[in-house]
């Protein structure tokens, strides 16, 4: 048992080295490998950020639904340092990932904002903000007898602002001339949906809810999350379609006039229409296996949404899949799982040592 942490650490380092070696040597261009990695990282970082947001929302509203999912959200929130550390290859590869680093003569990038020094400063500020919020939330949850609605309200506002800045830097800035005021809010809604789906799936896998009424309340909350994300995504598309301006349509053109349109249709059916139709049925809300399957489907579709956000800009011809995509997921998810297992192993060993030292 004492060798388990060392084994997990070796596997973590091996996965990182495998991606750095195979991705850089095997990819046709570094930009392709980094785009695959960015897709996986955006999907992963949404889980701890969304979990922190749900913990703060529950601090404001209360309710048995939040008590039932608190353990899962805390487990996900504790992966935030790992998720931030996994951004290191992207930060090092910024000159290949972002076209504004080396613009052409006819490019119109706002260089006063999009330059590497300020980009790194904004990333550091966002990461510091998220880490401070995570520490504050987890510390206050340890003192559950003391309410903290003021901190939760301020934290939600700060998180929405920081996620909006982060979305502009990592997603919007990769497309020249594109402007969208709804991107940050839509991405925040996607993080809420993915973290709720993850917590629900994990809770049902661990044994489910003690009261059927709580399970039904969580299913209703999942329906609200699906409706919220769907509304924001559709309104952003509708606004771009009505205005018909280059600043709005430049992002949608490679996604709707190439093979990427099939991914958009898949999101429309499997992340909007089907979940809404199923979650309107009381039988689905009360049937744990069906609800768990639906939560798993929504998690998979959040991965597809991350691909919809990132990959068409790197592959505008419509080539949907590259072998670097599963390699990036192997690195990101494998590292996160190893960190979670390492933390659990250390926690179990510490707990047993305390019990052995007792009277």
Image: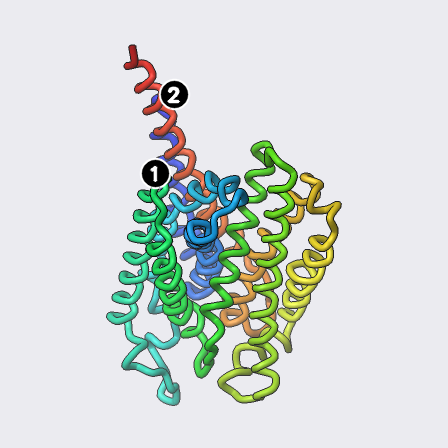
Judging from the image, what secondary structure is the residue with disc 2 in? loop
Residue 29, label in figure: none
> Where's residue 212, x and y in %?
65, 38
Name the image quarter holding residue 98: bottom left
Left or right: 223 as drawn, with respect to 137: right
Label whose residue precedes the other's in the sequence (1 or 2): 2
Please tell me whether residue 247 is drawn above or below residue 55 in the rendered image.
below
Please tell me whether residue 274 is drawn above or below residue 205 in the rendered image.
below
Visible residue check, residue 97 = no
Q: Please identify, in this view, whether the residue under mark 1 or under mark 2 is nearer the observer.
A: 1
Identified at 40% across, 64% down, the residue is 160
Q: How many other residues sit within 10 Å of disc 2, few (<14), some (14-19) or many (≥20)?
A: few
Of residues 182 and 68, the one drawn nearer to the viewer in this rendering: 68
Furthest residue to the top? 359
**Count of numbered tags:** 2
Of residues 59 and 37, the one drawn nearer to the viewer in this rendering: 59
Visible residue check, residue 347 = yes
Label 2 belongs to which residue? 1
Label 1 belongs to which residue? 142
> Where's residue 12, x and y in %?
38, 40
Name the image quarter holding residue 345: top left
Identified at 61% across, 47% down, the residue is 217
């Amino acid at each position: 048992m004492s060798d388990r942490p060392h084994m997990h650490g070796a596997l973590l380092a091996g996965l990182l080295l495998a991606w750095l070696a195979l991705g850089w040597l095997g990819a046709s261009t570094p930009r392709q490998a980094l785009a695959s990695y960015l897709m996986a990282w955006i999907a992963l970082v949404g889980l701890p950020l969304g979990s922190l947001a749900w913990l703060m929302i529950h601090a404001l509203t209360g309710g048995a639904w939040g008590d039932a999912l608190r353990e899962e959200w805390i487990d996900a929130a504790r992966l935030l340092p790992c998720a931030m550390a996994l951004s290191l290859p992207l930060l090092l590869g910024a000159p290949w990932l972002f076209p504004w680093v080396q613009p052409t003569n006819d490019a119109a990038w706002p260089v006063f904002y999009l330059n590497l020094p300020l980009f790194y400063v904004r990333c550091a500020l966002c990461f510091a903000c998220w880490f401070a919020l995570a520490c504050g939330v987890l510390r206050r949850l340890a003192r559950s007898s003391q309410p903290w609605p003021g901190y939760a309200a301020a934290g939600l506002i700060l998180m929405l602002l920081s996620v909006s800045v982060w979305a502009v830097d990592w997603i919007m800035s990769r497309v020249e001339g594109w402007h969208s005021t709804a991107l940050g809010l839509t991405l925040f809604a996607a993080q809420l949906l993915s973290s709720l789906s993850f917590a629900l799936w994990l809770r049902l896998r661990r044994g489910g809810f003690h009261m059927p009424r709580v399970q039904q309340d969580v299913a209703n909350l999942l329906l609200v999350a699906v409706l919220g994300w769907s509304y924001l995504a559709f309104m952003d598309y509708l606004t771009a379609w009505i205005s018909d301006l280059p600043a709005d349509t430049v992002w949608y053109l490679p996604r709707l006039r190439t093979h990427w349109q099939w991914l958009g249709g898949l999101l429309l059916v499997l992340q909007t229409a089907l979940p809404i139709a199923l979650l309107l049925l009381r039988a689905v809300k009360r049937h744990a296996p069906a609800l768990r399957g639906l939560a798993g489907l929504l998690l998979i579709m959040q991965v597809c949404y991350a691909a919809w956000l990132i990959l068409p800009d790197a592959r505008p011809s419509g080539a949907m899949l590259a072998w670097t995509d599963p390699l990036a997921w192997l690195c990101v998810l494998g590292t996160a799982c190893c960190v979670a297992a390492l933390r659990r192993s250390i926690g179990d060993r510490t707990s047993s040592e305390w019990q052995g030292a007792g009277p």
